[in-house]
Image (tube, helix red, strand yellow):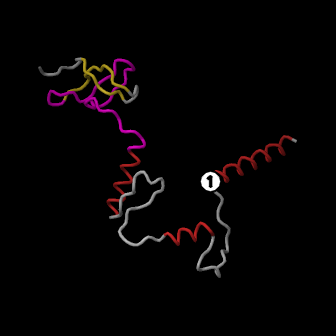
Amino acid sequence: MPQRLGDDIDDFCIKCKRLTNHSIVSLVDEKAAKVRCRTCYHDHDYRHEEPLPSKKELKRLAEEAALKAAGGALPIDGGGDDELLLGGEDDDDSEMDELSGDDDSAGEADDEPAPPPPAAKKAAAKKAAKKAAAKKSK
C-alpha cells in the first residue's frame, strides 16, 4: 500500500531521542522524505527508524578514518593505553627513560618552561579576575 501525506509512521525522533509516532509531511517517489513527530512536533528527515550514532561512536569512526587515510595502524583495544599495533622492535627502554627523566641528550637545557595545562590556565585566569574585581570594589 503506498504511503500518503498525513499517514502515521514510526521513526526515531532526533529531538526526543527515541522511537515515536510520526506523521508523513513530505513524499519523494511515494516514499516518506520528511516526517513530523507527534510527541514534540519537530519536523525532520525520515530516518528509517535508525537512531543517531553516539558521540563516542562518531569520535571512534573519525579516528579510524584519519588513521586509514594516513596509512597508519589501528589502536589495540583493551590495552588501556593508546598503543599502536606496529610491526617492528619494541622500544620499551625509551619509554622508561622518558618516565624516569633519564635522557641521552642530558646536556641540552630548555630555554622555556613547559606551558601549564589548560585547566591550570583557567584557574589562574579566574583567580586574577577575582583579584581585579576585589580591587575595583575597594
Q: Position of residue 8 (x, y in %)?
A: 25, 17
Position above or below: 29 against 69? above
Name the quarter where the N terminus is drawn: top left
Q: Quadrant of residue 116?
A: bottom right
Residue displayed at 35% across by 35% down: 52
Region of the chain picked out in magenta, as a range: 28-57
Give how far across and how far down residue 44 sits, in percent.
32, 29
* Left or right position of 119 against 75: right
125 to 91, vertically: above or below: above
Toward the viewer: 7 or 78?
A: 78
Residue at 44% over, 54% down: 79
Left or right of 128, for residue 42: left
- Pointer 1: residues within 10 angstroms few (<14), some, or many (20+)? few
In the picture, residue 103 is in which quadrant?
bottom right
Query: In percent of the image, x 70 and y 49: which residue is there?
Result: 123
The image shows residue 89 at horizontal and vertical percentages of 41, 72
Quarter holding residue 35: top left
Return the residue at label 1. Answer: 118
**Which residue lies most toward the right here?**
138
The residue furthest left is 1
Q: Residue at 42% of width from left, 41% of height from top?
A: 55
* Residue 132 relative to residue 97: left or right: right
Residue closer to the observer: 60 or 78: 78
Quadrant in which the C terminus is drawn:
top right
Q: Amino acid at mark 1?
A: Pro
Q: Is residue 129 magenta?
A: no
Q: Nearer the viewer, residue 106 or 15?
A: 106
Q: Secondary structure at mark 1?
A: helix
Report if residue 29 lies within the magenta region.
yes
Foreground of the two, 76 or 133:
76
